[in-house]
Image (spheres, rainbow, N blue to C red):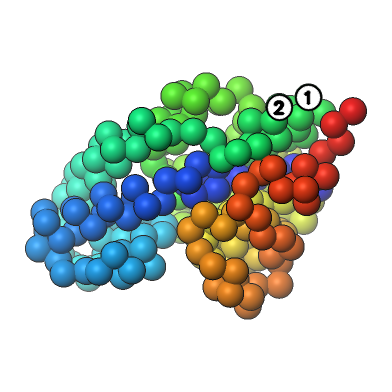
Amino acid sequence: MKAFIFDLNGTMIDDMSYHARAWQQLLNVDLGGKFTYEEVKKNMYGKNQEVLVRMFGPNCFTNEEMDSLSFEKEKRYQKEYLPELRLLPGLDSFLENAKRLAIPMAIASAAIPFNIDFVLDNLKIRHFFDAIVSANDVIISKPHPETFLKAAELLHTNPVDCLVFEDVPKGAEAAFNAGMNTIILTTTHEKNEFFHLPNVKHFCKDFNDEFITNLIPTN
């Protein structure tokens, strides 16, 4: 592979349970929904506004209301998760080795810049990445391929030469739609949820996995 593209939440950091709890509080306590944790987990992909429409229908909130609710949800998530914020094991070494070999790297996430900045700046890892694609940079979010295709374009790399790191089926599907292979971090979903996707090449719990460490020569 000539370039690496990373999803962020659940892929670089193990934080999806914190997102689910923040969503569940907002959807049920603030907005009067009656959604189970599993229902929330299954539907919290794509842009935050898309999640709200998915859960409550297309005409329940104005764009301004959805923007406000989105920001409130992220503030709650960040407050709870900040004490636990850390990269998945092995990712720091992986990023350093890839950077040393001048392998282009990008973040391609459905998160808003507020959340991406929260991770990159608190962990001081922004310098590893040559491009960042957020929810604000695309019209249609995953599983549409736009997020990953834009990242490949910014890296000046053919999509087929990009390897995607993901943690959710919709993200792996987006990679497939972009013509990219993917490695799945099993922080959030089970292996059997990905078996319909032929572009998934490996499953691992973190970046200390031998398959991943062998992607980059260390000498």
Q: Crowding near pointer 2: few (<14 within 10 Å), some, many (20+)?
A: few
Residue 104 at x, y = what percent?
A: 73, 35
In the figure, residue 115 lies in which quadrant? top left
Residue beneath the point at 82% across and 39% down: 216
Report whether 47 appears left or right of 158.
left
Residue beneath the point at 41% across and 51% down: 16
Quadrant in the picture for the C terminus? top right
Dot 2 amino acid type: Glu
Report whether 124 appears left or right of 162.
left
Q: Which mark is residue 96?
A: 2
Dot 1 amino acid type: Arg
Residue that carries the numbered disc 1 in the rendered image: 100
Q: Is residue 194 above or below residue 12?
A: below
Residue 44 at x, y = what percent?
A: 36, 60
Residue beneath the point at 55% across and 48% down: 11
Residue beneath the point at 49% across and 25% down: 123
Farthest residue, direction right: 219
How many angstroms separate mark 2 from mark 1 (CA)?
Answer: 6 Å
Kind of element beneath mark 2: helix
Q: Which mark is residue 126?
A: none
Q: Are marks 2 and 1 in contact (CB under 8 Å)?
A: yes
The answer to whether residue 114 is visible is: no
Residue 118 at x, y = what percent?
A: 40, 30
Kind of element beneath mark 1: helix
In the figure, residue 35 lies in which quadrant? bottom left
Q: Crowding near pointer 1: few (<14 within 10 Å), some, many (20+)?
A: few
Of the pair 55 and 22, the residue shown nearer to us: 22
Of the pair 114 and 16, the residue shown nearer to us: 16
The answer to whether residue 185 is visible is: yes
Report whether 67 appears left or right of 147.
left
